[in-house]
């Protein structure tokens, strides 16, 4: 609001000059018509020249200001993509069955190859409904980011970003309403029964993939160092998620008793059994060794 108040007098002054200068030129032309003095013709051209110069200068300054805001936007997106929206993009790419796009592939691709990946995303497919649900929930978590981005777009007069954020916030509101009425149900099960809604959701997820690749291409051209830092962070997070989600393969549970189970010792290659305090002793094992410790048959 304060910025608008500061701009208002300047815009009024510019409008006043746009009206005054042509009127002044018309007055000099009328004097030339009455007196037939050619000098008034030259004087009449001066206000029009000033007006034309002012219009060109105003357009130039507006373009420079817009260019500075685009440069600022690039750094704002770098912050958002590396922090609050990181899991959203990682989950979206990880959920893809076709094409298979990893952060390693993106980082090692040239601009031409990145454009090819973008074309491949026109025919995309997800691994499962559960994978789509995971991505949708990441959009829900990022609601505050989209709201802040919308407010920035309003302040800096980026209409296309503003409209995109409004569309995403409406989508997130749909998710919130569904979860409020069906807390135990999957949102994807709901949209599967509505082809138009399913089309809308897939279009939003696809646009998210496009947005990330477009930003990667922009950084590849203008700020490769920032891109390298961004993708290094993404790779570290993606590797961490894979380690967390990886199932444990070296344990074999033989019964439903949680106090007793077997596992394979990697060093000796032998099967060992762990017995809890509430279990009966193993054959050939003394009670002293059966207190939650690794035991072996004697």
Image (spheres, rainbow, N blue to C red):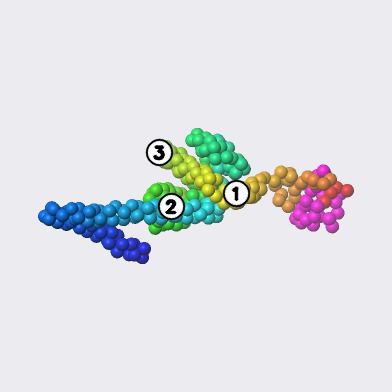
Q: Quadrant of the N terminus?
A: bottom left
Query: Does the rendering let one see residue 71?
Result: yes
Task: Point out which mark residue 67 bears.
Answer: 2
Few, some or many residues within 10 Å of mark 2 (<14, 14–19, 20+): few
Q: Nearer the viewer, mark 3 or mark 1?
A: 1
On the image, the x and y values in percent for residue 15 come to 26, 58
Q: Residue at x 25, y 56 (%)?
A: 47
Q: Quadrant of residue 104 in the image?
A: top right
- Going from N to C along the chain, the mark reached first, 1 or 2, is 2
Q: Residue at x 49, y 52 (%)?
A: 74
Viewer-proximal residue, 110 or 261? 110
Viewer-proximal residue, 237 or 52? 52
Q: Residue at x 83, y 55 (%)?
A: 289
| Label 2 with label 3: CB-CB less than 8 Å | no
Label 2 to label 3: alpha-carbon separation: 38 Å
Span colored in magenta: 269-294
On the image, the x and y values in percent for residue 70 come to 45, 52
Few, some or many residues within 10 Å of mark 3 (<14, 14–19, 20+): few
Q: Which residue is mark 3?
A: 196
* Left or right relative to 254: residue 194: left
On screen, residue 34 above or below 194: below
- Going from N to C along the chain, the mark reached first, 2 or 3, is 2
């Amino acid at each position: 609001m304060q910025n608008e108040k500061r701009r208002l007098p300047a815009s009024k002054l510019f409008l006043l000059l746009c009206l005054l200068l042509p009127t002044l030129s018309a007055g000099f032309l009328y004097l030339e018509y009455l007196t037939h003095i050619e000098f008034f013709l030259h004087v009449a051209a001066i206000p029009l020249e000033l007006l034309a110069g002012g219009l060109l200068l105003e357009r130039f300054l507006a373009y420079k200001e817009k260019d500075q805001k685009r440069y600022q936007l690039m750094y704002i997106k770098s912050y958002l993509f590396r922090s609050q929206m990181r899991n959203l993009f990682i989950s979206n790419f990880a959920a893809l069955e076709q094409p298979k796009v990893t952060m390693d592939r993106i980082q090692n691709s040239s601009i031409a190859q990145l454009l090819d990946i973008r074309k491949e995303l026109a025919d995309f497919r997800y691994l499962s409904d559960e994978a789509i649900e995971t991505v949708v929930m990441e959009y829900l978590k990022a609601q505050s980011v989209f709201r802040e981005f919308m407010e920035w777009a309003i302040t800096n007069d980026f209409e296309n970003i503003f409209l995109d954020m409004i569309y995403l916030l409406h989508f997130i509101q749909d998710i919130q309403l569904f979860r409020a009425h069906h807390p135990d149900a999957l949102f994807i099960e709901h949209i599967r029964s509505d082809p138009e809604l399913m089309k809308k959701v897939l279009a939003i997820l696809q646009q998210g993939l496009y947005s990330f690749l477009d930003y990667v291409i922009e950084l590849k051209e203008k700020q490769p160092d920032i891109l390298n830092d961004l993708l290094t962070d993404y790779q570290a997070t993606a590797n961490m998620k894979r380690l967390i989600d990886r199932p444990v393969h070296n344990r074999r549970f033989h019964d439903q008793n949680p106090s007793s189970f077997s596992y394979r010792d990697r060093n000796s290659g032998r099967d060992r059994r762990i017995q809890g305090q509430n279990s009966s002793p193993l054959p050939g094992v003394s009670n002293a060794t059966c207190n939650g410790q690794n035991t072996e048959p004697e």
